[in-house]
Image: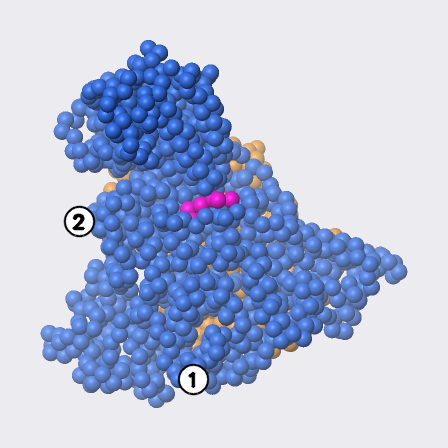
Amino acid sequence: MRHYYLYIMFIFIGSTFLFNACQQETYTGPLPEKIDFNFHIRPILSDNCFLCHGPDVSSREADLRLDLEATAKAVLDNGRRPIHAGNWSESEMMRRVTSDDPDLQMPPPEMNKRLSPKELALLEKWMEQGANWKKYWAFIPPVSPEDKTFAPLPNTSQKIDYLVDKALTANDLSQSKKAEKAALIRRLSYLLTGLPPTSIEINEFVESENPDAYELLVDQLLASPHFGERWARHWMDLVRFAEYKGHEFDYPIIGAWQYRDYLIRAFNQDVPYDQLVKEHLAGDLLDHPRINPDNGLNESIHGTQFYTFSENKHSPVSIKQEEADVFDNMIDVTTKTFQGLTVACARCHDHKFDAIPTTDYYSLYGIFESTRFALLPSNTGLDAFAKVDSIEAIKRKMRELIVGNKGETLSLYTPSPNIDAVERTSIPTTVGRSSESSGIPQKILTNATSANKPTIIADFRNGTLNSWTSNGLAFNNQNALGEPIFNKNGKLVRLEEAKVSSRILGTGMQGALRSPTFIINREKLLVRAAGEGAMIRLIVDNFQLIQAPIYGSLEKIVHEGEFKDYVLDLSMVQGEKAYIELLPGKKTSKDGKGHYYEFEATAWIEATYALLFNGEQIPPAPPLPSFTFTNKSDAYLHWRNGIANPAEIAALNQDIRQGKWRQNTIPFHQLNQKIQTLAQNLYDTTFFQAVTEGDAQLSPVFIRGNRTTLSETKVPHQFFDALKDYSPTFSAKGSGRKELAEGIANPKNPLTARVMVNRIWHHLFGKGIVETVDNFGLQGKIPTHPELLDYLALQFIEADWSIKKLIKNIVLTEAFQRSTIPTKSALQQDPQNLYLSHFPVRRLEGEAIRDALLAVSGDLDKTLYGEPFEIYLTDFIKGRGRPRNSGALNGNGRRSIYQTIRRNFLPPFMLTFDMPAPFSTFGKRNTSNVPAQSLTMMNDPLVQQQAEVWATTILEKQASFEERIESVYLTAFARKPVDKELADAQDFFKEQAEIYEISASNLFEDKQVWADYCHAVFMMKEFIFLTG
Amino acid sequence: MQNKNQYSRRQFLSLSKNGFGGLALFSLLGAAGCGEQTLTNGLGFSDFGRKLPMYPAKAKSIIFLYMDGGISQVDSFDPKPRLAKENGLNPYEKFKVDATQFNNIGKILKSPWDFKQYGNSGMWMSDLFPHIATCVDDIAMVRSMVSDFPEHTNANYFLHTGHGLQGRPSMGAWMNYGLGSDNDDLPGYMVLDGGLIPPGGLDNFKSGFLPASYQASILSAGATPLANVNPMEKNPALQARKLRLAKKMDASLLGKLGHEDQVNAAIKNYELAFRMQTSVPELTEIKGESDLTKRLYGFDSDDKHTSSYAAQCLLARRMVERGVRFIELTCPNVGVDRWDQHNNLKDGHMRNAHAVDQPVAGLLKDLKQRGLLDSTLVVFAGEFGRTPFAQGKDGRDHNPSAFSIWLAGAGIKGGTVYGETDDYGYRVVDKPTTIHDLHATMLHLMGVQHEHLTYRFSGRDIRLTDVHGEVIAGILA
């Protein structure tokens, strides 16, 4: 392993600075005994050869591939093989990489790149040993270490230590000693909860003689509700969490904060990671969504909110380009977050280094094209569904009361004999729901024969949904045909005609009804509709921020009770794909910002048909679909069974008009009252932006990434080529997100568990086993401890993907508990501390620093969840879309995770301390060192304010000066001061008091001096670093 | 602290080229805590070191005069007599019209301004810029600029970062990543906020995935020029003593830790921050400037926007004197929106031009008379141009297919007109020049070959110029 380390150093710098001087030298240093293709050879080939001889055909030279064994070892035109197993001197590659002839030399002279002597020696030895080729390491499933000592070790933590120590030994490194208890509790508390330990917790732990005290502390911190806050924020860096869309005016991503709360709950409840994966990718499609036991709400569906956090613009000149940019971001984030793969690199060409063809990219593109952005109700859960069931049961009862099921005619009509016969069979549960039959195939829509003939998209007067789909409670996923309509007095006046209606369960129901996707082949869209506080929206290429200029015509407000024709001008979006959305809610603005929505309690929308047409003349209604009415008794029966056609309903309505329904004998009024009461409780005022399922769209490959040059064939929905064995076959219907989720969450998938355990390791040790936590590809780093990575991954899966168990096992190791003080050998041989001989010194993240300020001062409000708090506005926060109102300087004491993330107005304190801008996956934050950080701690009003609050808190409690200083040290540094520090503090008070001209008698009680002292403590590095 | 390191990195690079051993210095730099990402990511930093060609740099500093909103090229720098001849005609009958942002295409619209020739070079310029017109012999005019984006935010990101979406490092960040600052006490990348932060917000000036050290410091005209730069203590000694106590504690911490670069670097950082409390106010203090100088910039203008932009331009010169690498000026808020005249072109462009014309000319002249123009590159550019036909009646919509920018100063061949548009100024017909080309040229003049300034992110070695960019040789001296 020592060789390996040296080797890494050479990869970084060997060929760069030193090579020119020693090109002709022969390497005489140590080499690994057994050369491993993955860890020693492939990185050399990747860095030096693959750009022109790798997977990407577009940049390939001499038609030669060196990334595949077959071609790399095949005979060339000159009779030699690039790689010659058994004899390197026969190898064409070796000839070229050592040649000085500019015509032969590889890499070519203009690359200004030569292999180092060590690299050459590795290649030679590898060929001598038979040039053994292996699949890329990250695509090989993890295996347990083959080690006789390893297996019998009693627990996971010891096994982890064994593997860490093994690497230490191999590199002649020794372990630092165990950290002091005070340092440990501070380390643990910050790393697990993001908050400092309280002085009580510190004293208890430090003084405890219980040998299990450490483990008990770990359990306690893992059970803390603040654990979820800390780890949710880590995850939010991956999914570029933002609550606003950026671009010019920073429009809102509605309900984004609900996703943050979902994460906090999920981490606190230790939801298995594979479940979390499925919820993110396809939480709306799970057969058994996770229900929150406290309120009966669907948790799983919140996972899909992560899709919506991208930057979005209004009025893009090319709507298709906007879609491509949004999807590119979704592809980038999805693949990096869950697989550690940079699939976005394959937008324009096959990945230049990894086995990721463009088809991987455009398969995902098609998957996202088949997914629809949607507003979903937040508080509609089991309770609401139970109410809907009750409403439907009541309606069923009404029908039964009229038509009967016991043989007697009940109240009205003379039954035909066969009513009885059928009555015996049970009433289908789908009563009231029209079957979905007559959807219009897309090809009919796109291949209209005559340009002047309107294309009918849907005619709901046929009593069906025409393959439209609804989400939420509006529309109840049915045609309204045959629904009983009551007047104010509770009298049944008629049965509803055929149409779609958002108020089948009552007005104000949230949700939307959406058409299948079609291609716009006419100048205009007509929707015949009526409603109140509602909208018709045409979603073109999944574009959401509809407004003028350019796209204002793609939506219409519906606010008239009478049916009329709503016409949308489509001239700007000819030939694009689109779907219609009927929304019983409307766009509004809040705090001066547009693109919010509201669903008023009185809102509703109904529609009878939609068609595309050309010209100025508004086409008349299409001919009514014709239906046959045979006899009334069948009509009644059909109605009761929910399969009556419009003609039959008309016949029934005739009966009603003629007073044949003797309503006195049936408690319609009462039943209707019940329905109304139930429906009122269904009204939901909160919602969030997430996704719902669309119909399957396949994308062609955009050649060279250009949306105007498309491949002839389209890419089917499929899993990543290199991992294709791990996913189920993709259905031809729907988006394919479910299959995608199953492929990623598959325990056999070699990346999923490795990537996640590595992220957890990174957050605990400050550095991943694979340091490039978001990139497990060839351009990423190779693992420092491959066996350990594999072991952790296997262990993680075996322990039911439990994040808490994994964290516990890691923090119980000796490696985690080591002091930050390095040994001499570590400083010399492993200055980067790759092998963890000591614990790394770590600077706290921006969130933890701000939270610590609040926690030590006593200002911290530990409330969990809820709407975000606004950023505090300064003169330096400006630009278009600036928030109207400033938040409180201290954010009302709330933890940083609850601060609003406005894409164009990111919180300055957080940015200064390296919170990433939310545009891509950031599994690893920078740790920069900039003067703005010092200036913040010196002069930021928040820091000054918190020093004053802290001073007040300190003085509120009766105590001696020494006791107070001791409490400051405990709170800020989790340790007690030494004598010298006490003396320094005393001197400081005296000096400061001198300037303020405070008398000696009062000096240790003066609030201003205390505030100055607390401020100085904030500026000490020990406050923002984890040391000891 | 980090400035010093970056500067020494440059020295170091030239050292290593001259054959000094690199390894020891390399680890020294690693210890400095700057560019940590580069070091740990491997190739980015060393690539840079190996490939940096070390051209003799023409420019030490760049002043980027950002003309937010998109100046109309046919009303400023690119005369088109045909527009007058065909004024009021239907553009669809004359040429193919592209989709525009506002989709409100009116008639062909002649320029409300006259064009004249100026200087020895006889360069054409409209009456919008009478002062800048007196500097044409120092200016290279590029009339053939094209951009990829017709929307402000994307075009802004593109112009500033070489990429149309949020998140990439700004050109100023790249310059500092490559070159560092020449001043120990001032950040190397400063944005002088004239009043309008462009669409896309502060992300136009961020360091993206580069370490935060490279992001812009935003200077405002207010009482606090830079966020948190003014101490809140009433008496400087109060702050000094707090810092002294902290430093004492830090020293003992460092003693306990044995060896800790990161903490050490953070300690040093406080010293820089402390110095900035003086250096920044000193920078912005212009009392010592002569009246003559101030008048040259237009301090005495009746137009308060002119005088405020004059102050910004003067500050830019003071930054150049202090070795700030990259300085950007944003536009003043003249009350009719920035250069984005979708209607009322005449009034809007007039007001915007009046605010910047004299100060910019004053800046060029002042730099020249102080001998600084030879080592300072001045770039005057918006994010795109405007349409030769009207939007509505009297506005112009966005046009990314042709616009004019100019450069002056270090390494620039004054009096040059480069590239050509069609008879309407609608599209480029000769020497199309991209934003990437502009960036490549700016880097070139700073002594950096743009292909070699890379940073490894997301599995790629990313450049300011992406995979494009050619130096605009035709405008170089």
Give how far across and how far down residue A1000 sits, in percent.
Answer: 87, 61
Instruction: Give me the chain that's orange.
Output: B
Q: Amino acid at mark 2?
A: Thr
Real-space Cα distance between discs 2 and 1?
A: 55 Å
Q: Which is more foreground, mark 2 or mark 1?
A: 1
Quadrant in which the C terminus of chain A is drawn: bottom right
Q: Which secondary structure is most common in the magenta stretch?
A: loop
Residue type, mark 1 in image: Thr
Quadrant where the N terminus of chain A sits is bottom left
Q: Is residue A209 left or right of residue A35?
A: right
Q: Nearer the viewer, residue B208 or A389?
A: A389
Q: What residue lies at 27% left-to-right and 48% top-to-bottom?
A: A366
Q: Which element carries disc 2, helix, strand or loop?
A: strand
Which chain contains the residue that carries disc 1?
A
Residue A613: give x, y in percent of width and height: 23, 25
Q: Earlier in the sequence, mark 2 or mark 1?
A: 1
At x 60%, y 63%, the residue is: A220
Viewer-closest of B253 and A140:
A140
Figure quadrant of residue A481: top left
In the image, residue B465 lies at what x, y percent? 35, 55
Q: Which residues are magenta?
A: A295-302
Q: What residue is disc 1 on?
A: A149
Q: Quarter-wise, where is residue A401 in the image?
A: top left
Q: Colour of chain A?
A: blue
Indicate whether A285 appears above or below A53. above
Circle 2 sits on which residue?
Answer: A713
Near-viewer residue (A391 or A1002): A391
Tag 2 and tag 1 share a subunit: yes
Would you say residue A296 sits in the magenta stretch? yes
